[in-house]
Image (cartoon, rainbow, N blue to C red):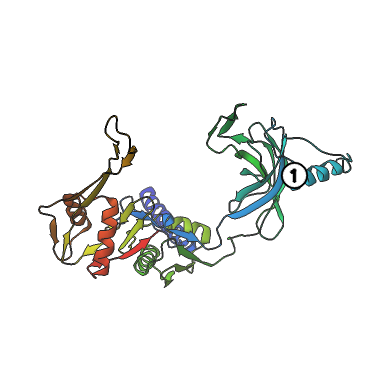
Amino acid sequence: MNRVWKSFIVVVLAAVVASTSSFAASKKPVAAPLMAVPAMAQGSTRIKDIVNIEGVRDNMLVGYGLVVGLNGSGDTLNNSPFTEQSIIGMLERLGVNVRDDKLNTKNIAAVMVTATLPPFTNQGSRIDATISAMGDAKSLQGGTLLVTPLLGADSQVYAVAQGPVAVAGFAAAGQAGSSVTQNIPTTGRISSGAIVEREVPFTMDHMTQTRLGLRNPDFTTARRIELAINNYLQYPAARAENPASVALQVPPGYKAGIVNLITDIEQLRINPDEEAKVVIDERSGVIVMGKDVRISTVALAQGNLTIRITETPQVSQPAPFSQQGDTVVVPRTDLQVDQQTGNKIAVLPEGVSLQALVTSLNALGVGPRDIITILQSIKAAGALQADIEVM
């Protein structure tokens, strides 16, 4: 009898456990469509490194102030009337009246103060400030910036800067006029020298959609971002609007919010595409060519023609003991023309790569200036399958 009761009790307990498990499973919330980011991805670049989030940007601040405590290297008040007016206004606010007095000090300089307010910076946070002289001050070394309000584009005060100015350069001069200057002594910096007084009103917790702005607009890159996000979420949440932006919408049932959604997708990796372009800086002779630059079949010839003109003046004077004649300088010009000969022709086959192009140009022994001319000539001939951008 005891054995029968024990079997019955075991069956009842098993049924209770099974019903409890099924009830708990039915009450379990549906998980959001999250997927772990694979450790090894096929792409080479994260999405966060090539896009900007719409609305998430820096704000530029600017202000006008005074730097005091300079060792005779400040503004000359005769040449900088705005400095004198600023000194008078500052002293009047402090209860000192010097309006009818003649000021003669070189320890004060009028400066412009600039700063960058990062996005989502909280009130009371500190940011760096850059100080630049406006007048004829020689150096800001050892100076202290007085309280300077920093304004935004809407003329509202967003930060206040003050503190000792750190200058990386210096200037020294002697009484005879000799001087030495290192770096720029009229520009300084105050690390964490500005306190944020007003926050930029921008929140994202209530947003259900946003846009990703490509830093280098490209149709192919925008399409790859769209496919990577949609494959990750298993939902068409991303849509490439144009080569510069990809619209992003929070999928239905995604309870984590747009902030967590951006955090998840910005770690996805893709291979960004780029257009074939050759960038030339004629001032410095720098040439940068993309990996997709291709050259059609073309022959290159480069020869150096050197013309050397040497002036060797000679003195012509009359014979000894002669009664007539003058001593004169007779010009002598030596002209030499040098033209290098030899195998200076290189033939590039169809669709040659950048490496083959550089190798051929190096084989010709040409320099950066000649390479610039050669690339422009190839482009003019229609054999360069890339755009040339001259800076």
The count of marks equals 1
Residue 301 lies, in percent from the top left, at 16, 59
For the point 82% across and 46% down, which residue is it? Answer: 89
Tell me: 55 left or right of 136: left
Tell me: 329 left or right of 102: left
Residue 14 can be seen in this image: yes
Find the residue positioned furthest to the bottom.
241
For the point 20% across and 57% down, which residue is it? Answer: 357
For the point 15% across and 61% down, which residue is it? Answer: 348
Residue 143 lies, in percent from the top left, at 68, 34
Q: Which of 325 and 182 is in front in this view?
A: 325
In what element is the residue under mark 1? helix
> Which residue position holds label 1?
83
Find the residue positioned furthest to the front.
323
Amino acid type assigned to the residue bearing label 1 in the image:
Thr
Q: Which of 245 and 281 is in front in this view?
A: 281
For the point 35% across and 57% down, which residue is it? Answer: 280
Tell me: 39 left or right of 164: left
Residue 321 lies, in percent from the top left, at 29, 29
**Relative height, residue 300 to residue 129 (above, below):** below
**Relative height, residue 336 to residue 201 (above, below):** above
